[in-house]
Image: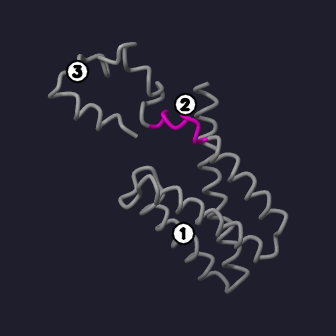
Amino acid sequence: MKALGWAALALVFVDELLALAALAVWGYHASGIAVAVAAPAAWAAAWFLFAAPGARHGSRIVRPAVKVIALGLACLALRAAGYTVLAIALLVFSAGINGLAQLPAIRALPTSGGKGRHDDADPAGHRVGGRRLSVGSAIPELAWTAY
């Protein structure tokens, strides 16, 4: 399952690169090379600030909303450039792979170093990372491992 999960996350990254390429294609068709560079750069900046896993302004609501808007805009841009079939294919691929990446086992991979979120704890949940949790140590540990 871990290999499938990492493959899904790699495909999410490929999806993001395809979105950048779609914006570059639209920018070139719309106004030339300047917009072909500026549109993906603006998209990447917005993604960095709001949608990336470590985004400064991302939250449980903002991150998914920005992802849907950003990937949707990339699909619309590709459609506006005259590539309707590719735009639909990108939309289906984006929805499918990002939906798959929301499965709990796959979502836990980046935060656990590939071990899975629950592999750290004993069945009673008293140990995290091999250390016994006390009241004083529980809050920093849980904050570190929280998604």
Above or below, 46 against 36 in this view is above
Q: Mark 1, mark 3: which one is toward the viewer?
A: 3
Helix, strand or loop at disc 3?
Answer: loop
Asked if residue 131 is among those painted magenta in the image, a careful observer would answer: no
Q: Main secondary structure of the magenta part?
A: helix
For the residue pair 147 and 112, the one nearer the viewer reads as 147
Q: What label does residue 133 carry, if any?
A: 3
Residue 36 picture location, percent across and down:
63, 77
Give the residues in magenta.
101-110
Residue 118 picture location, percent across and down:
44, 23
| Amino acid type of the residue that numbered disc 1 sits on in the rendered structure | Trp
Asked if residue 102 is among those painted magenta in the image, a careful observer would answer: yes
- Quadrant of the snapshot with the C terminus: top left
Residue appearing at x 54%, y 34% in the figure: 104
| Chain-order first, disc 2 or disc 3 | 2
Q: Colour scheme in the image?
A: one colour
Separation of residues labelled 2 and 3 (CA atoms): 24 Å
Residue 113 picture location, percent across and down:
43, 30
Above or below, 62 against 129 in this view is below
- Quadrant of the snapshot with the N terminus: top right
Residue furthest out toward the left:
136
| Amino acid type of the residue that numbered disc 2 sits on in the rendered structure | Ala
Residue appearing at x 48%, y 34% in the figure: 108
Q: Which residue does the numbered mark 1 point to in the structure image? A: 43
For the residue pair 136 and 54, the one nearer the viewer reads as 136
